[in-house]
Image: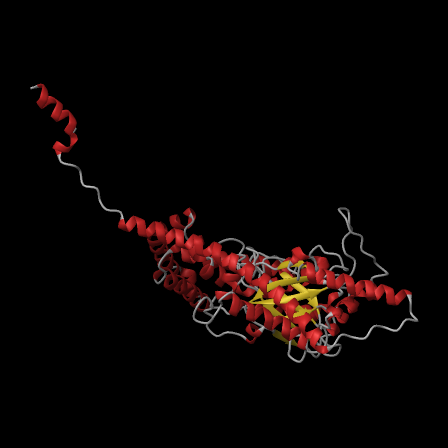
Amino acid sequence: MLDEKFNLHGSHATTMGGCPILIVNGPIRNSISLNCRLGVLGSGTRVNASIGRAIKLVLQNVGGARLGGTESTTLGSPNKWGLCIGELEELLEEEEEESPIKYGKDKPPLKRWVPYHVTRGFKPSENVVTVMAVTGGPYQLVDFKTTSSYELCRSMARIIKTLYESRIPLLNHVLCVISPEHWKLLSSDGVKTKKQFQKMLFDHCNRLMVSDIPFIVARLLGPRLSKKPIFKTLSKFLFPLRVILLGILVAVLKSDAMQNNVDLMLGVRIFIGTMILVLLFTKSLSEIALWGLGYFLAGICWFSSNILNKPLGIVPKVCGPDSFQVIVAGGGAGKFSAFFPGFGVGRDGPLANMTIPISRTIINDAGSGGGGEEEDEEFKEDDREGEARSENNDAPPPPPPPQSERRRVASSRFGMVQDRIKLLLRKYKLQHSTTLNDKKKEEKDDQQTPEISPPPPFCFLNPKMEQEEEEEE
């Protein structure tokens, strides 16, 4: 979370209620009994709740993220209490022998669904934790009738379209938690990889955004497009266009064809009258041009999606297929999947990529945030004892340490981790505080610097020179 690309302060202090979510992958999930199945997003599992709550308490008590201070969320979210989940990798390992994965520079494209950390460049045997900022959710899809991957992706796209607001495009990241039953339907109906699922979901989102393209172009993108030179030039021709349109209306109404055909005359009157009202009550011609451009693009997207069956992402809901962060988790029964919107919109600008998911491997050496040399020695001693017991099975196992000793070791390890977290956060706060203090000091020095008045004319003469001239005289 201290990575600059994650932008901890921005994602946690926003009024949208952003908060970090931890995604754990690798064999360590089973070692610490992390829940990946029933109620994976809910309460009832001590490990998930303890890790998520510990992160929140560190941010609050060590980092100083308190309500009314650096945390200014408007409504808040239950996710603020802490959210830590694991992916159900055992479900994805069923096809591993049929399509093994090779690693290296020349690795082939993935032929099956793989764990989330593998899609981010790690090996399946590595223990990886990923932190991602979410600003809402979970938005749950309730599904009872879908029997094909096409229908399922279309239903999921309807939920994703409502994230933030149904007409806000270009979301940077969306976390998709796919239930095992939905995964079985997708994988059995031709969706063999996560990459294929992301592309299919992206296309369905583009189909649903077609009807909102005119509004997005005219209202959301209009202020930026209206500054272009071509739209500034169009505003000069608004008055001549009104005069020409009025002349056309008078000429059409006086023609013989209009006088003889009543139905044609009524239709033309309605059309031209509507155009005149639009031009009279429109502030600029650029606004008309933007709406026209929006309907033109919407027509192209509709033709490409429905006739050619090739959806165009002119104004997509998300920036691209890779914006979907896909994991498989949850109980074995139930067609329910959930979605979390990330923090940031747009491909460029101040709101784009305000935070990105960060992944790190989990190791136990001293340089990775572990307990240090003492903790390493304890782990090595435990390994040696385990090897000795495996070599000599007849020897009775040593008695377990008393409960007080186990508590002492656990508390010492927790204290070491806590001290290291405090040190990192103190260093982070010190860097930012020094920069702020330097800026304040410079501003204060600029305000207190007195104005130097010019010296009087006689001060330019040296007193010693005057005394020498008197002596000579």
Residue in front for this viewpoint, 271 or 102: 102
Q: Is residue 136 left or right of residue 145?
A: left
- Residue 55 in percent (x, y) is at 59, 68
Q: Is residue 98 left or right of residue 292?
A: right
Image quadrant where one finds the C terminus: top left
Residue in front for this viewpoint, 335 or 157: 335
User: Visible in this render: residue 119?
Assistant: yes
Image quadrant where one finds the N terminus: bottom right
Q: Is residue 304 left or right of residue 238?
A: right
User: Visible in this render: residue 83?
Assistant: no
Relative to 4, say whether 163 is above or below: below
Residue 143 found in image quarter = bottom right
At 42% from the left edge and 67% from the top edge, which residue is drawn?
270
- Residue 248 in percent (x, y) is at 38, 56
Q: As drawn, which residue projects farthest toward the left?
A: 473
Residue 393 found in image quarter = bottom right
- Residue 207 in percent (x, y) is at 61, 64
